[in-house]
Image: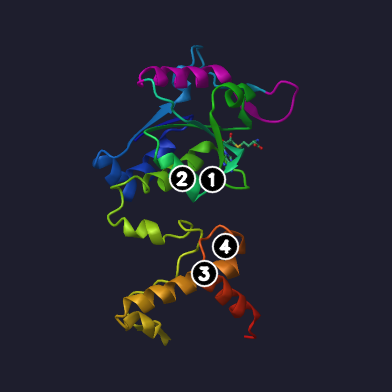
Amino acid sequence: MHIDIFCLFPEMLDSPLEQSIIKRAREKGLVEITAHNIRDYTHDKHHTVDDYSYGGGPGMVLKPEPIFEAVDTIKQRIPAVEVPIVLLTPAGRLFNQRIALEMASSSHLMLICGHYEGIDERVREHLATDEISLGDYILSGGETAAIVLIDAVVRLIPGVLGSEMSLNTDSHTNNLLEYPQYTRPPVYRDWEVPPILFSGNHREIDEWRRRKAILRTCERRPDLLERANLSPEEKQWIFESLSSPK
Ligand SMILES: C[S@@+](CC[C@H](N)C(=O)[O-])C[C@H]1O[C@@H](n2cnc3c(N)ncnc32)[C@H](O)[C@@H]1O
């Protein structure tokens, strides 16, 4: 996969995209990530990337020309495939694991990061093919949003994670939050690891984990359960657990 990021502060991306899993994925050649500075696509003496908002109001708005020129220049180098051009914006559709999975199947992604007050609307209307929000809060720039999106997408590319198994148990993969995890020591400050985990009975351990995952999702994110693939027995079990007095 190739990922091109168009932003004003490419240095912000350096360290996060050069560590851990993303670093290894890049070294293995599973993903190639290039950050382009939008400022390099300006033609005036001051390399102007922003201007005042027409109609007045606070803050500066990113001009359309350098962004269109940057994206068009890189697109020309790519074979004629449809490349998703994702605008990072708090007004986009809310990012989640399903969207990350969708994106992980693309051979190429382009991410446009805004800064300051925002981006000229024509970028959204005539250049972006998708708009993604990382959540209902405001970041100072799209660079941090791009880091989060890339991290979530890259770990889903086949071959990136050591054990593909962990993908299947991660929270949100099956619309269930992950079950509780423990490691050594078996007792820490009088807090014991649940004995079932030492039983060696993998069927019972899987069942215990599944129930814990369902229960945790039920308590913390009941909205997810509707999309989780629960058996009629599991639905009945939830009903009984919720209706029985504690
Ligand atoms: C300070 S914000 C601008 C917010 C804009 N005034 C608004 O209310 O939508 C600057 C840039 O950060 C990025 N950004 C901020 N919050 C974001 C979020 N929740 N998701 C994705 N990108 C975000 C966008 O690229 C945005 O153009």
* Residue to which mark 4 is pinned: 225
Label 4 vs label 1, nearer the camera: 4
Mark 3 or 2, which is nearer the eye?
Answer: 3
Q: Is mark 1 within 8 Å of ligand 1?
A: yes
Q: In this figure, which residue is indicated by the disc labeled 3?
A: 214
Location of the N terminus (image quadrant): top left
Mark seen at residue 100: 2
Query: Residue 102: x percent and y percent?
Result: 45, 42
Residue at horizontal 71 percent and vertical 31 percent from the top: 58
Q: Quadrant of ligand 1?
A: top right
- Magenta segment: 53-79
What separation in Å lies between label 4 and label 2 (alpha carbons)?
19 Å
Secondary structure of residue under mark 1: loop
Q: Give the mark count.
A: 4
Q: Residue 229: x percent and y percent?
A: 50, 61
Label 3 with label 4: CB-CB less than 8 Å: yes
Q: Nearer the N terminus, badge 3 or badge 4?
A: 3
Q: Choose top left, top right, bottom left or bottom right for residue 131.
A: top right
Please state which amino acid type lies under the numbered disc 2: Ala
Q: Which of the marked residues, 4 or 1, is nearer the chain's N terminus?
A: 1
**Can you tell which quarter of the image residue 95 is in?**
top right
Q: Nearer the viewer, residue 232 or 217?
A: 232
Above or below, comparing residue 186 to residue 174 in the picture: below
In this view, the residue in front, 93 or 243, is: 243
Amino acid type for the residue under numbered disc 4: Leu
Label 2 crowd bin: few (<14), some (14–19), many (20+), radius 10 Å:
some
In this view, the residue farthest toward the right is 55
Q: Is residue 202 magenta?
A: no
Mark closer to the chain start, 4 or 2: 2
Answer whether labels 4 and 2 touch (C-beta < 8 Å): no
Q: Which mark is residue 95?
A: 1
